């Protein structure tokens, strides 16, 4: 379902930009000021967020097979364009 895929990509990009771009520079800057080191602030923030992302990806792995099967089922039940009855 191309429209569903486009919606999913759009939502993913929106969430990534809302939670990443909107406050990331300020958060790292505040941490850097508090610690007195930009390098230390980045060493704290970057691996932590990568671990969070890896954890969420692992959670998503549990539904891949079911999602793939559901998608295959929907696509196999769909009529080919132009093969439907004329109204």
Image (cartoon, rainbow, N blue to C red):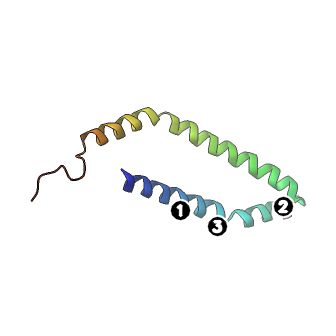
Left or right relative to 24: residue 55: left
Residue 5 placement (x, y as % from top left): 43, 52
Regarding residue 73, the answer to whether it shows in the image is: yes
* Residue 51 or residue 12, whichever sits in front: 12
**Disc nearer the start of the sequence (3/1):** 1
Left or right relative to 21: residue 10: left
Q: Are marks 3 and 1 in contact (CB under 8 Å)?
A: no
Residue topped by disc 2: 32
* Residue 19 or residue 12, whichever sits in front: 12
* Residue 14 or residue 45, whichever sits in front: 14
Q: CA distance from mark 3 to mark 1?
A: 11 Å
Residue 43 placement (x, y as % from top left): 82, 50
Of circles 2 and 1, which is in front? 1
Mark 1 neighbour density, 10 Å: few (under 14) some (14–19) many (20 or more): few
Q: Are marks 2 and 3 in contact (CB under 8 Å)?
A: no
**Disc nearer the start of the sequence (2/1):** 1
Residue 68's quadrant in the figure? top left
Q: Name, please, the residue furthest toward the left.
A: 87
Residue topped by disc 3: 22
Callout 3: SS:
loop
Residue at the (43%, 32%) spot, across then down: 65
Relative to residue 75, is residue 11 depicted above or below? below
Of circles 2 and 3, which is in front? 3
Residue topped by disc 1: 14
């Amino acid at each position: 379902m191309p429209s569903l895929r486009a919606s999913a990509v759009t939502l993913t990009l929106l969430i990534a930009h809302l939670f990443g771009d909107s406050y990331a520079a300020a958060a790292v800057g505040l941490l850097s000021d508090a610690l007195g080191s930009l390098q230390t602030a980045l060493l704290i923030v970057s691996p932590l967020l990568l671990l969070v992302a890896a954890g969420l990806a692992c959670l998503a792995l549990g539904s891949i097979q079911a999602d793939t099967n559901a998608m295959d089922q929907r696509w196999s039940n769909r009529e080919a364009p132009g093969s439907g009855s004329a109204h």
